[in-house]
Amino acid sequence: MVELGQRFPEAEVITDPGIPTLAEAFDSVTIAKCLRQARPDRWEAIEDIRFQLLKHHPGKRCTFEISLRAARTRTYLIGKVYAEDRADVYRAMDEIRQMGFGPGEELSIPQPIAYFPALRLLLQEKVEGPRAKETFLTGNEPARVEAAERSARWLAKFHSIAPRSGNVFDLSNNMDAVERWSQTVARLGEPFATQARKLFRRLEEEAASANGRELCAGHGSYNCNQIILTKDRTITFDWDGHDVADPSRDVARFLVALQRLAFKYLGSIRALDAVAEVFLKMYQALNPVEISATLSLYRGLTCLRLAKYEANRPVCTLREGIEALLAEGLRVLER
């Protein structure tokens, strides 16, 4: 088994029957051909191609770094191979780029390079820099405040001008999935089962309030682990979940993910409440769309969803965190 972050020769790449083009995507000859096809002006002469595994979701997708030398310069790219055709991800990224999130913009995304349908392979710019998560965990208060404000500015701009692309997320049509999340948590036994069922019932009662809301482009899983903060740019990556949704959903995901981070690493779900408030106030100041009517609903929904993630791990090690998330979901809905 190849360790995450380990460089390896092509002969030792991972195998995954669920991603049939994976081995071909890790072939240096194939990658060189793809790059020349995408940018013949830049990558005509390529040598010394290396691969580094970043993340593998068996049967779904595999993300890796490509390092290569061309014209005496070493370049780093990110490749993503999917089990299914995801040309939509490339199209969405390219449309977002064209609408003001290009490489020269302060608020941007990793620049899409090309998508190769035969390989189900997406190539994009690799952005170097610390993630917002690191700042929230280890930075001083001014650094945390700045990170929260930058994250809010990015999301407000995205919701205001990004083109709507992808499926429309309708909560009322997804309640069967939400119920399954509660059942996954309930399998942990008490007190989780009672909390999860109560939270699901509250979400079911409130779901109708989400109907008829103004929708916008959605990231799908916006959080501080997918935001890179460089000196000149704020970059959001991972566009696999792009869709069209109530803007409250992305805001809620950021806020609850911050609470989960605070519990896991800082010992209290409330430890980052101050910077969460900074984020929320900045977002509301910049985005004219009113989100207060559904924000509590989507915060409760996200609490249940992240509790399900923890409960669904092969070994659940954050039982107290799951209980805290369920309690927080109930608190915001009852407030």
Image (cartoon, rainbow, N blue to C red):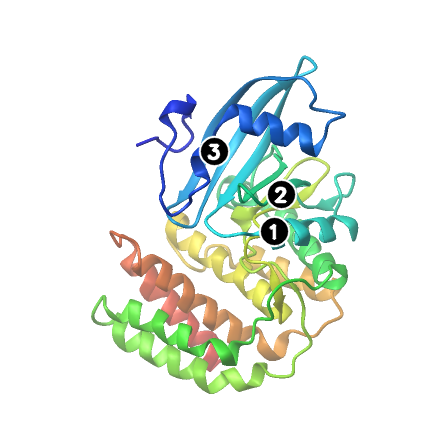
Is label 3 in a helix, a strand or a loop?
A: helix
- The residue to which callout 1 is attached is 87
- The residue to which callout 2 is attached is 115
* Earlier residue among tags 2 and 1: 1
* Earlier residue among tags 1 and 3: 3
Q: Nearer the viewer, mark 2 or mark 3?
A: 3
- The residue to which callout 3 is attached is 24
Is label 2 in a helix, a strand or a loop?
A: strand
* Residue 29 place in picture, x, y as percent: 54, 24
Name the residue type under label 1.
Answer: Ala
- Asked whether disc 2 touches disc 1, contact meaning CB atoms under 8 Å apart, the reply is yes
- How packed mark 3 is, by other alpha carbons closer than 10 Å (few <14, some 14-19, many 20 or more), is some
Name the residue type under label 2.
Answer: Tyr
Q: Is residue 2 above or below residue 325?
A: above
Q: Nearer the viewer, mark 1 or mark 3?
A: 3
Residue at x-position 30% and y-position 72%: 183
